[in-house]
């Protein structure tokens, strides 16, 4: 049976020093039903991931590589990937980490959920059935606190708004002004979840088992963690007047 996303889904994989993981990851993605295409966004990885990506792409027309000059951040890598995917006409633009924390075999579940009427689907650790395996307690705590603050401060209802395993429908990325997104790093994920919700898009989650990487090193630094908290403060102060106006309008239009 042909998958409904046949040739219409692009998986964007940002990479920085992922040579141990990339070939197997791309192999498993390309073995999925529905010919999921892969875009690798590599930031001139010192370990030669970019060259390896070129070699993979040379043997498979379903794989493309976007090279950038240096480490420009996860958020801007996603944005470059979205711009490429939109220009190529894809209907479903997905993202995942290269380190197997996100299982390639869960991608069809994200696409299925998107097709059932969701504009953004997140592979979530924090809904019933979701799990985290092998993460150090401090990482778990930071992730938990970041999500809790996003719920409390920003009113984001998504349970896992820091997850990078996502599927966006094309219309989401056409509506949101990607160039106006301030975050260039990991906090891009929180900002996108916030902007999608504020724009009225329907956000769904599918449970996933997040497995801590076994190959390569984490790129998340202390400054990225500070930036995530700064992003929430920034979005909060920007959101407040707007939210107040809507609340005021709603209150007065119903009385
Ligand atoms: N192109 C690009 N990719 C990046 C950059 N920073 C991180 N990545 C990639 O983004 C993905 C997520 O990064 P990770 O280091 O796994 O971050 P994480 O999953 O939050 O942290 P761990 O759980 O410790 O692995 C991986 O595929 C990285 O290679 C960047 O500046 N540019
Ligand atoms: Mg990771």
Image (tube, rainbow, N blue to C red):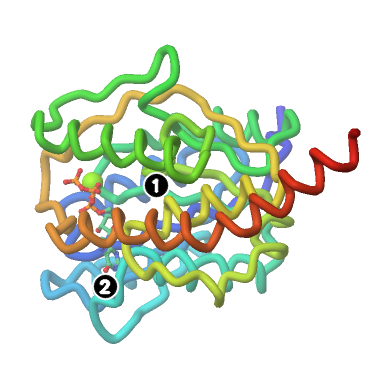
Q: Which residue is depicted at the point 69% across and 36% down?
A: 118
- Secondary structure of the residue carrying numbered label 1: loop
Q: Which residue is depicted at the point 64% across and 30% down?
A: 112
Q: Which residue is denoted by mark 1 in the rendering?
A: 164
Where is residue 169? Give x, y as percent: 67, 49
Beta carbon of the mark 1 residue lies under 8 A of ligand 1: yes
Question: Would you say 172 lies left or right of 233 here?
Answer: right
Where is residue 56? Give x, y as percent: 34, 63
**139 above or below 230?**
above
Where is residue 183? Give x, y as percent: 40, 67
Q: Is residue 102 visible?
A: yes
Where is residue 178? Give x, y as percent: 57, 70
Identify the image quadrant of residue 69.
Answer: bottom left
Using a 10 Å C-alpha cutoff, classify the residue at mark 1 as few (fewer than 14 neighbours), some (14 to 19) or many (20 or more). many
Q: Is residue 58 visible?
A: no
Q: Which residue is depicted at the point 42% across and 30% down?
A: 124
Mark toward the viewer: 1 or 2: 1
Pick the quarter of the image with the C terminus.
top right
**Residue at the extreme bottom:** 69
Which tag, 1 or 2, sits closer to the chain's start? 2
Beta carbon of the mark 2 residue lies under 8 A of ligand 1: no
Q: Residue 144 or 218: which is nearer the viewer?
A: 144
Identify the image quadrant of residue 160.
Answer: top left
Q: Residue 50 or 77: which is nearer the viewer?
A: 77
Q: Residue 12 or 181: which is nearer the viewer?
A: 181
- Secondary structure of the residue carrying numbered label 2: helix
Pick the quarter of the image with the N terminus.
top right
**2 above or below 19?**
above
Tell me the distance, in whole angstroms, between the alpha carbons under discs 1 and 2. 21 Å
**Residue at the extreme top:** 128
Q: Residue 13 or 38: which is nearer the viewer?
A: 13
Q: Which mark is residue 50?
A: 2
């Amino acid at each position: 049976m042909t998958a409904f996303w046949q040739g219409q889904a692009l998986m964007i994989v940002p990479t920085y020093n992922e040579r141990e993981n990339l070939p197997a990851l791309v192999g498993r993605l390309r073995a999925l039903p529905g010919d999921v295409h892969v875009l690798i966004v590599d930031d001139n990885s010192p370990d030669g991931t970019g060259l390896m990506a070129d070699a993979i792409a040379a043997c498979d027309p379903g794989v493309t590589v976007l090279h950038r000059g240096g480490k420009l951040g996860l958020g801007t890598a996603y944005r470059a990937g979205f711009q490429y995917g939109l220009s190529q006409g894809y209907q479903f633009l997905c993202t995942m980490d290269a380190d197997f924390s996100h299982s390639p075999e869960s991608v069809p579940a994200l696409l299925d959920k998107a097709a059932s009427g969701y504009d953004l689907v997140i592979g979530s650790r924090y809904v019933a059935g979701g799990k985290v395996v092998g993460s150090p307690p401090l990482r778990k705590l930071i992730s938990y606190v970041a999500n809790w603050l996003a719920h409390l401060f920003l009113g984001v209802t998504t349970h896992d708004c820091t997850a990078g395993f996502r599927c966006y429908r094309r219309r989401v990325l056409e509506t949101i002004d990607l160039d106006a997104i301030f975050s260039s790093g990991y906090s891009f994920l929180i900002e996108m979840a916030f902007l999608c919700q504020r724009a009225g898009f329907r956000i769904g989650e599918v449970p996933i088992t997040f497995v801590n990487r076994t190959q390569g090193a984490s790129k998340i630094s202390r400054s990225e963690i500070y930036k995530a908290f700064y992003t929430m403060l920034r979005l909060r102060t920007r959101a407040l007047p707007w939210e107040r106006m809507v609340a005021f309008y709603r209150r007065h239009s119903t009385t």
